[in-house]
Image (cartoon, helix red, strand yellow):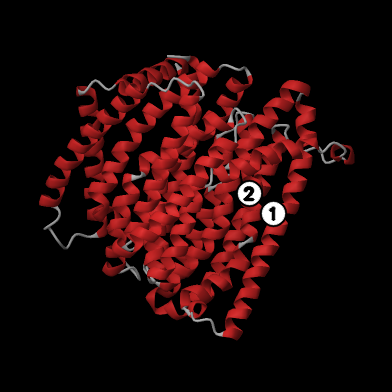
């Protein structure tokens, strides 16, 4: 096994551990938001308002800006050294502050004007409780986009410096702040305080801003510690040529990597028309599905981007292709069983993570079909995080742009077709199909560029994982619901213990079947881990 793969796995494991902690806290937050806000108008307004600045986080904080910065930093350091990097970062960050400030003012001020106009003209759509909340909360929440996008840019620079875990830990702050606010409210007031929840949501929005500002401050300290802090002297701003190069990378890359994020936002905007339960159903399930995407695929993509940028700079396309195929096989090996787990066991999962407090059985019923379809899309969502670095590392931003535009258009059309017969489930299915289309187009483009993607090997890996996961999940589904389904009266902790045992049994069954099917990914992962253990020893 190549040393580079062991290093990638080591770095990925560290980022994944930090991300896992963040996602666990995120699931606790989902539970608290469902308990406090329920699955109706209040949750719909809060989640839709928060989705707007969160879109900028995913586009810039975790997306195009970071992926564009890494090859630029690599090029500047190779040509002229760290001093040039710090001068260019000064120009980039100063410009970014101005642009993000304009975005905040535009969206915040525009929302305030829309709210005033809607009140005076009595527009019926904006008079619903959920839309009134959106218009009231968005001006407060928009500055979070400023803080979190700058944090994403700083994190990308630290990632290139091989600092992965500490930036990933910064994401914990938002969950800590929101969990603290939600817990404090519920223990003080409980369901008796429902009348005061709209006012409480404004306080929660201020906690979001505090978390974003603190995260940016801490990452700025890390930049200085690792010698990457921008050189803010006036002389650094005489040469702004880096902005032109960044623009040509970021704009196509932002749209090119935006298909999934824009699809999720379009989902929620269209879901508003389906009633008060549609947006919470999509949002809560999305956050659950985001756990495997964040733990494995996003962590791997973050680390791969830095490694691929160095490989691309050396012009070794054959190695790029080998690495891409290797990690795509492992994405299928890990993510297909995750999909099977959600598809077969979404009912107990939703009951554990959402049901209770103000979240009712009717709210849960609205989320069932969403969970099935979003769960089925996990492999496609995760694969995209690994495929895109193969383009971005070579500074090829326009091809993902075209693919993304096709996927966004397909998602909108499919949404309008499927949302009426399948409600919010149809919206989730449209997003999954559009993501599969995006993956397919990108892989075809890579093959046409001469990448040997070994389609037979990829298909074999996916088929073995699907067979093993399907058999394990189907057998345990029958056993679990035969034993637990009719038990009734179980406490939350008993259900959690039962689901934990189920998850452990599924992992053991899946790996056992994968070994019986002689899955090479199992041997490869075991080999990497043995070498890591030997090196540590």
Q: Which residue is mark 1?
A: 100
Residue drawn at point x = 63 percent, y = 49 percent = 149
Can residue 61 be seen by looking at this rendering? Answer: no
Q: Nearer the viewer, residue 537 or 243?
A: 243
Q: Nearer the viewer, residue 110 or 283?
A: 110
In the rendered structure, are the residues bearing label 2 and label 1 in contact, judged by CB atoms less than 8 Å apart? Answer: yes
In the rendered structure, the answer to whether residue 165 lies left or right of residue 228 reads: left
Is residue 107 depicted above or below 445 in this figure?
A: below
Locate residue 85, reporting x and y percent: 75, 31
Q: Nearer the viewer, residue 227 or 77?
A: 77
Is residue 103 depicted above or below 361 in this figure?
A: above
Locate residue 338, reporting x and y percent: 31, 40
Q: Earlier in the sequence, mark 2 or mark 1?
A: 1
Q: Which residue is mark 2?
A: 149
In the rendered structure, the answer to whether residue 17 lies left or right of residue 400 reads: left
Mark 1 falls on what kind of element?
helix
Is residue 458 depicted above or below 233 in this figure?
A: above
Can residue 4 be seen by looking at this rendering? Answer: yes
């Amino acid at each position: 096994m190549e040393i580079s793969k062991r290093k990638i796995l080591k770095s990925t494991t560290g980022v994944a551990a930090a991300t896992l902690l963040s996602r666990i806290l995120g699931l606790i937050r989902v539970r608290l938001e469902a308990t406090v806000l329920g699955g109706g108008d209040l949750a719909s307004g809060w989640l839709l308002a928060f989705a707007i600045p969160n879109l900028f986080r995913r586009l810039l904080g975790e997306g195009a800006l970071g992926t564009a910065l890494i090859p630029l930093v690599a090029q500047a350091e190779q040509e002229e050294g760290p001093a040039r990097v710090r001068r260019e970062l000064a120009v980039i960050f100063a410009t970014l502050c101005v642009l993000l400030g304009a975005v905040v003012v535009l969206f915040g001020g525009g929302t305030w004007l829309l709210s005033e106009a809607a009140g005076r003209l009595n527009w019926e759509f904006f008079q619903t409780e959920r839309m009134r909340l959106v218009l009231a909360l968005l001006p407060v929440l928009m500055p979070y986009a400023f803080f979190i996008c700058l944090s994403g840019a700083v994190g990308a620079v630290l990632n290139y410096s091989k600092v992965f875990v500490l930036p990933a830990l910064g994401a914990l702050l938002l969950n800590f702040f929101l969990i603290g606010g939600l817990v404090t409210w519920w223990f003080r007031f409980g369901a008796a305080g429902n009348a005061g929840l709209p006012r409480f949501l404004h306080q929660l929005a201020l906690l979001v801003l505090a978390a974003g500002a603190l995260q940016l401050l801490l990452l700025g300290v890390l930049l200085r510690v690792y010698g990457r802090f921008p050189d803010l002297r006036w002389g650094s701003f005489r040469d702004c040529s880096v902005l032109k190069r960044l623009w040509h990378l970021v704009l196509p890359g932002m749209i090119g990597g935006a298909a999934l994020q824009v699809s999720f936002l379009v989902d929620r905007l269209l879901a508003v028309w389906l009633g008060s339960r549609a947006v919470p159903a999509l949002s809560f399930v999305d956050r659950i599905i985001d756990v495997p995407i964040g733990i494995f695929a996003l962590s791997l993509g973050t680390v791969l981007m830095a490694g691929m940028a160095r490989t691309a700079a050396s012009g070794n396309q054959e190695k790029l292709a080998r690495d891409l195929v290797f990690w795509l096989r492992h994405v299928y090996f890990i993510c297909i069983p995750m999909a099977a787990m959600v598809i077969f066991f979404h009912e107990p999962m939703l009951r554990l993570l959402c049901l209770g407090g103000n979240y009712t059985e009717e709210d849960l019923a609205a989320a069932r079909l969403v969970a099935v379809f979003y769960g089925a899309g996990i492999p496609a969502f995760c694969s995209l995080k690994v495929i895109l670095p193969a383009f971005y590392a070579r500074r090829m931003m326009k091809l993902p742009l075209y693919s993304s535009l096709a996927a966004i258009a397909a998602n909108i059309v499919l949404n309008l077709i499927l949302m009426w017969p399948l409600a919010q489930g149809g919206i989730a299915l449209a997003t999954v199909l559009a993501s599969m289309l995006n993956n397919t187009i990108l892989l075809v483009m890579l093959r046409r560029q001469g990448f040997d993607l070994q389609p037979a090997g990829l298909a074999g890996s996916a088929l073995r994982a699907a067979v093993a996961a399907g058999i394990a999940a189907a057998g345990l589904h029958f056993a679990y619901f035969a034993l637990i389904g009719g038990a009734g009266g179980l406490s939350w902790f008993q259900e959690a213990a039962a689901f934990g045992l189920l998850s452990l049994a599924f992992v053991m069954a899946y790996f056992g079947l994968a070994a019986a099917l002689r899955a090479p990914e199992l041997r490869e992962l075991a080999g990497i881990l043995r070498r890591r253990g030997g090196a540590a020893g």
